[in-house]
Amino acid sequence: MPDPRIHPITAVDDTFVTVLAVSTLVRAVNTSRAELDLVNDSDESIYLSRGAAAVLNSGMRLNANGGAYHMGPENIYYGAFYAICAGGDANLCVSEGSV
């Protein structure tokens, strides 16, 4: 978690995205992003991509049943995130903090 004295988080958006068998937009560009947590809440692997369409078996893999990606101030990326899965009906939990 970012140090609130250095990186105050003033807004949080907790939601979910249904990841499809085609590249699915998970988060749009956000230049106010301070942190992002993505957790795979499904029984199949999800593949993430930053800034371009997601492709199966490429990019960052989130394993089934809890695979997670955390991004904080030390590795912040303001661009869009995309995801894809083979089955086409995977739940991805999303928590994004902004300043």
Image (cartoon, helix red, strand yellow):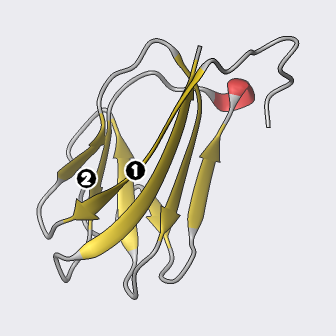
Query: Can the viewer see residue 57?
Result: no
In the rendered image, which quarter contains the N terminus? top right
Rate crowding at label 1 as few (under 14), some (14 to 19) or many (20 or more) other CA atoms within 10 Å: few
In the rendered image, which quarter contains the C terminus? top right
Is residue 23 toward the left or the right of residue 17 in the image?
Answer: left
Q: Tell me the quarter of the picture where residue 89 sits.
A: bottom left
Is residue 58 toward the left or the right of residue 52 in the image?
Answer: right
Real-space CA distance between mark 2 and mark 1, rounded to the nearest whole angstrom: 20 Å
Q: Which residue is mark 1?
A: 15
Q: Position of residue 10 (x, y in %)?
A: 62, 17
User: What element does badge 1 sit on?
Assistant: strand
Q: Mark 2 and mark 1 in contact? Answer it, CB < 8 Å.
A: no
Q: Tell me the quarter of the picture where residue 2 sits.
A: top right
Q: Which residue is mark 2?
A: 54
The residue at the point 44 percent across, 12 percent down is: 31
For marks 2 and 1, give the one nearer the viewer. 1
Is residue 15 toward the left or the right of residue 38 in the image?
Answer: left
Q: Position of residue 93 (x, y in %)?
A: 45, 60
The disc label shown at residue 94, or none: none
Q: Inspect the image, locate mark 2, and give the three-letter code of the amino acid beneath it.
A: Ala
Query: Can the viewer see residue 26?
Result: yes
Q: Position of residue 22 (x, y in %)?
A: 11, 62
Is residue 83 toward the left or the right of residue 73 in the image?
Answer: left
User: What element does badge 2 sit on?
Assistant: loop
The residue at the point 20 percent across, 45 percent down is: 53
Rate crowding at label 2 as few (under 14), some (14 to 19) or many (20 or more) other CA atoms within 10 Å: many
Q: Inspect the image, locate mark 1, and give the three-letter code of the amino acid beneath it.
A: Thr
Q: Is 47 situated above or below 79?
A: below
The residue at the point 23 percent across, 59 percent down is: 55
Q: Tell me the quarter of the picture where residue 81 sits.
A: top left
- Work out whether mark 2 precedes mark 1 in sequence or the reverse, and give the earlier one: 1
How many numbered markers are drawn?
2
